[in-house]
Each structure stands twice: as C-alpha cells, then as structure tokens.
Image (cartoon, rainbow, N blue to C red):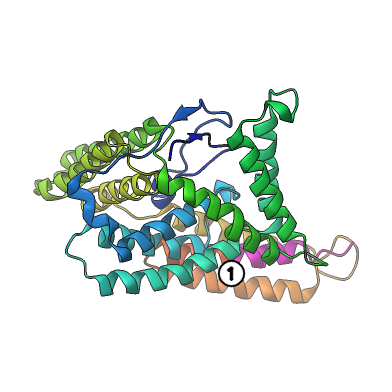
C-alpha cells in the first residue's frame, strides 16, 4: 500500500517507553511536522518470518496499541503502578516473542494477561483531558502553515476525519466521562494508527538507531564502571545477546519492516541492554531505584505536612486528614523497607501521592 505517511505531535515509541526509567527518561521524538516520506514496508528477511505467526502477531499488535495509548499522556505521569505492571509484562513479552522456541500456548497466555494489564493502563492514562489535548494538538499540527482546508493532503483529510469521528463517539453520551473518551480513542483513533503501523515502515528510522546507540553507550559505561570496581566476571554472553538484538533492529530497518515490528524489536534490544547492565550488580549497584528515591523523598515531604495547623478554621486542616496521612506514611515506610522491585516502590509512591493530594485539598477555606 503506497501511502505518504506523516506522524504528528510528540510521540513516545515502544522502545523508549519500555525501558524509560532504566535508561533515564523519555527520548526526544520527531517534531509535529516531520518531513513527508514514502515508507511502505517491504518483505522482512526470512530469518524473521517466525514473528508473523498468530500468537506473536497478537502480542506485537498489543504492544503497538500500548504505544499508541501512551501518546496523550505526559512522561511525568509514568511513575505509577499501572505503568510498572505493564512494563514487567512487556519485558516478558519481548523475550517470549523474540525466542523462536516459545510455544504458541505460552505466547497466548502472555497475550491474555497483557490485554488485562493494557486495559488497566488505558484506564489510567486515557482520560478526557489528555485525549482532548492530544487530538487537538494533532489537529493544530495538521493545519499549521496552510491557508485553508483545500491545501490538505488526502492523508491529512483522513486523519482529521478520524479525529472528528473519535470526538463524535466520545461526546455522544449525555454527560461524557473519561471512559467514553478512552473507548472512542481506542476503538477509532488507535485502531486507525495501528493499521498504519501494520503496513508502513518508520518515517524516521534514525530515531530507532539513536535509541539502540544510546542503550549501547550506557551499557559500555556501566561495563567500564564494573571493571573499574574490580569485576573480572565474563559478561560476553550478555553483551552478545544485546549486539544480536541491535543487529536485528538494523536488519529490519534496512528491510523497511513495519513500524510495529521495528518497535517490538527495538524494545527488545533495549531490554537486553538493561538486562546486561543489571548483571554488573553488585559492582555497579542497581539499587536504589529512582522510584525508591522518589518514595523516600515523598515520605519526608508528607511527614513535614503533619506539622501544619489543625482545626476547623480557614487555613487549618481537619484532624481526620492528619490521621489518614499518617496511616499512608506508615504504609509507604513499610513498602520502602520490604519493597524489592520498581513496581513495588511505584505502587507505594502512587498511593502516597494520592493520600498527600487528599490531605492538601482538605484545608479549610
């Protein structure tokens, strides 16, 4: 299908999201009006043919839908339990999809769990505010720099029509809710983008090469740090696994493979880089995680609020609010002591944030 593709707005790739925390945050992605290019996928190398089987295709599609469902959110919102639960399963999915020996039954089981977690993920991130904000941004990006709609390309018109239909469905309810907007975004807009992801090659292949390069640089820095700390262990297997994954990305880019396939394989390469880095522990300690540090900091901030004035006068906080915040702090301290994974600390951080938010909003006015 020979189509001119233009991607709009600030986007998060699957690869950057999958290991965003491990690799220090979210990458800089193409500007709103990227250069138009003809990018139609070609036949992928025979060595990747196994990725087209039904169970793997299902997981690759789910991964792409998660990426598309991430577009409306802000990177600052990602330190949540839903994000980390999704991340843990995504890494399992990467490994299973890329291993030719993984059984169809195992892939199908992962896909069922993936769908459930993806639903929770979408519930968290696809609310009315972010969906409207994102789609409005796409509309403005399309119309920027043109005189009137007669100058729109066929692809521009199609995208605007999809957005109009998304809004129409979301607003068809008498009192539209976040769920109405989420469902409309997923059922109309996301499905349309997924079609593009299935038949078209990346319009900015350099983005994926940059992510692999960044992963390699971080891996090499941490390897040097492990050697400097006295490690004499053999890491050749881990390094080779990453380089093979990086080579797979390059092969698929050179073959103009589909966006959704390149996203999956790039995510796997970053996952293998992080896996290698974690093997350098204890020479290069993995802990404390960033989420662990954030939780410790929020606990201290929440404790400081316990000294605020209590009472029923303006500027004071009710006694019940202090009790609720104190209980939340104790739970967070227990999680800090017992937690073992990023997901553990993120869940506690998310919960304490909500408790702290409730406390701050309980002030008498």
- Check disc 1 and report its element: helix, strand or loop: helix
Q: Main secondary structure of the magenta part?
A: helix
Horizontal side of 164 relative to 7 (left or right) equals right
User: In which quadrant is the N terminus drawn?
Assistant: top left
Q: Which residues are magenta?
A: 351-365
Horizontal side of 223 relative to 15 (left or right) equals left
The residue singled out by tag 1 in the image is 329
The residue furthest front is 1
Horizontal side of 223 relative to 290 (left or right) equals left
Q: Position of residue 180 (x, y in %)?
A: 70, 64
Q: Judge the density around disc 1: few (<14), some (14-19), many (≥20) Cα neighbours within 10 Å.
A: many
Q: Is residue 364 magenta?
A: yes
Q: Residue at x 32, y 64 (%)?
A: 54
Q: Quadrant of residue 247?
A: top left
Q: Residue at x 39, y 49 (%)?
A: 260
Q: Position of residue 264 (x, y in %)?
A: 35, 50
> Is residue 280 visible to us here?
no
Q: Position of residue 168 (x, y in %)?
A: 74, 56
Q: Is residue 223 above or below residue 94?
A: above
């Amino acid at each position: 299908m020979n189509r001119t593709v233009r991607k709009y707005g600030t986007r998060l790739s699957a690869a950057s999201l999958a290991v965003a925390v491990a690799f220090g945050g979210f990458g800089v992605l193409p500007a709103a009006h990227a250069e138009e290019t003809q990018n139609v996928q070609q036949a992928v190398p025979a060595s990747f043919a196994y990725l087209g089987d039904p169970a793997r295709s299902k997981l690759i599609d789910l991964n792409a839908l998660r990426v598309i469902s991430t577009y409306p959110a802000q990177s600052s919102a990602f330190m949540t339990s839903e994000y980390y639960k999704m991340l843990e399963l995504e890494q399992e999915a990467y490994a299973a999809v890329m291993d030719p020996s993984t059984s169809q039954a195992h892939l199908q089981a992962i896909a069922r769990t993936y769908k459930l977690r993806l639903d929770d993920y979408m519930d968290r991130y696809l609310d009315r505010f972010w969906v409207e904000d994102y789609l409005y941004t796409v509309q403005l990006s399309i119309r920027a720099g043109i005189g009137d709609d007669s100058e729109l390309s066929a692809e521009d018109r199609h995208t605007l029509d999809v957005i109009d239909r998304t809004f129409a469905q979301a607003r068809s309810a008498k009192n539209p809710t976040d769920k109405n907007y989420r469902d409309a975004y997923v059922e109309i807009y996301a499905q349309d983008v997924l079609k593009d992801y299935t038949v078209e090659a990346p319009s900015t292949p350099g983005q994926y090469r940059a992510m692999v390069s960044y992963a390699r640089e971080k891996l090499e820095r941490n390897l040097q740090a492990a050697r400097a700390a006295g490690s004499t262990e053999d890491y050749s297997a881990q390094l080779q696994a990453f380089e093979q994954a990086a080579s797979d990305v390059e092969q698929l880019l050179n073959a103009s493979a589909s966006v959704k396939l390149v996203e999956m394989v790039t995510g796997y390469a970053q996952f293998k880089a992080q896996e290698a880095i974690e093997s350098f522990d204890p020479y290069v300690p993995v802990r404390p995680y960033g989420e662990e540090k954030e939780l410790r900091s929020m606990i201290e901030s929440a404790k400081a609020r316990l000294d605020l004035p209590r009472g029923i006068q303006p500027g004071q906080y009710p006694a019940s609010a202090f009790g609720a915040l104190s209980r939340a702090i104790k739970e967070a301290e227990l999680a800090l002591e017992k937690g073992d994974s990023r997901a553990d600390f993120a869940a506690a951080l998310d919960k304490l944030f909500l408790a702290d938010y409730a406390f701050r909003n309980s002030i008498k006015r």
